[in-house]
Amino acid sequence: MNTTCTLTIGLLWFDDAPDRDLAEKVRRAAQRYQQKFGAPANVCYVHPSALSDNGRVEKVGRVRVAAKPSVLRHHFWVGVAEGGGGG
């Protein structure tokens, strides 16, 4: 699956809390995105090490979570991907 896309508007979120799992961190980032921009996010890019199966795409609610090597560890690049599919 191709994970290359362009986010026209995005939010970079940092969360290194060891007591929160990936899904909770993505939910919090997506919630902040919606608060800030007034629209729901549909994609969240994370460092490949954050995904359990070596880059496997996951979903948290309606948000696709995909690996992107340029995203630093503990950072979440959340937003709306063109075409609505997240890449």
Image (cartoon, rainbow, N blue to C red):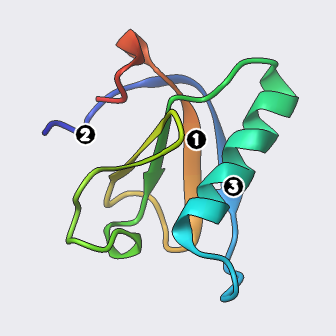
Disc 1: which residue: 78
Q: Is residue 46 left or right of residue 17?
A: left
In the image shown, does 57 or 3 lie closer to the viewer?
A: 57
Q: CA distance from mark 2 to mark 3?
A: 19 Å
Provide the secondary structure element on which disc 1 rests: strand
- Sequence order check, earlier mark of 2 and 3: 2
Mark 1: amino acid: Val
Which label was assigned to residue 3?
A: 2
Residue at horizontal 41%, vertical 16%?
A: 84
CB within 8 Å, label 2 to label 1: no
Residue at horizontal 71%, vertical 82%?
A: 17
Q: Residue furthest top?
A: 83
Above or below, comparing residue 33 to residue 55 in the picture: above
Mark 3: amino acid: Trp
Which label was assigned to residue 13?
A: 3
Above or below, comparing residue 15 to residue 76 in the picture: below
Q: How many marks?
A: 3
Q: Is residue 67 left or right of residue 36?
A: left
Query: Picture quarter containing residue 87?
Result: top left
**Other residues around mark 2 within 10 Å, as few (<14) / some (14–19) / many (≥20):** some
**Other residues around mark 1 within 10 Å, as few (<14) / some (14–19) / many (≥20):** many
Residue at horizontal 32%, vertical 56%?
A: 67
CB within 8 Å, label 3 to label 1: yes
Provide the secondary structure element on which disc 3 rests: strand
Q: CA distance from mark 3 to mark 1?
A: 8 Å
Q: Residue furthest bottom?
A: 18
Mark 2: amino acid: Thr
Above or below, comparing residue 78 to residue 17 in the picture: above
Q: CA distance from mark 2 to mark 1?
A: 13 Å
Image coords of residue 59 (percent x, y):
41, 46
Residue at horizontal 80%, vertical 42%?
A: 32
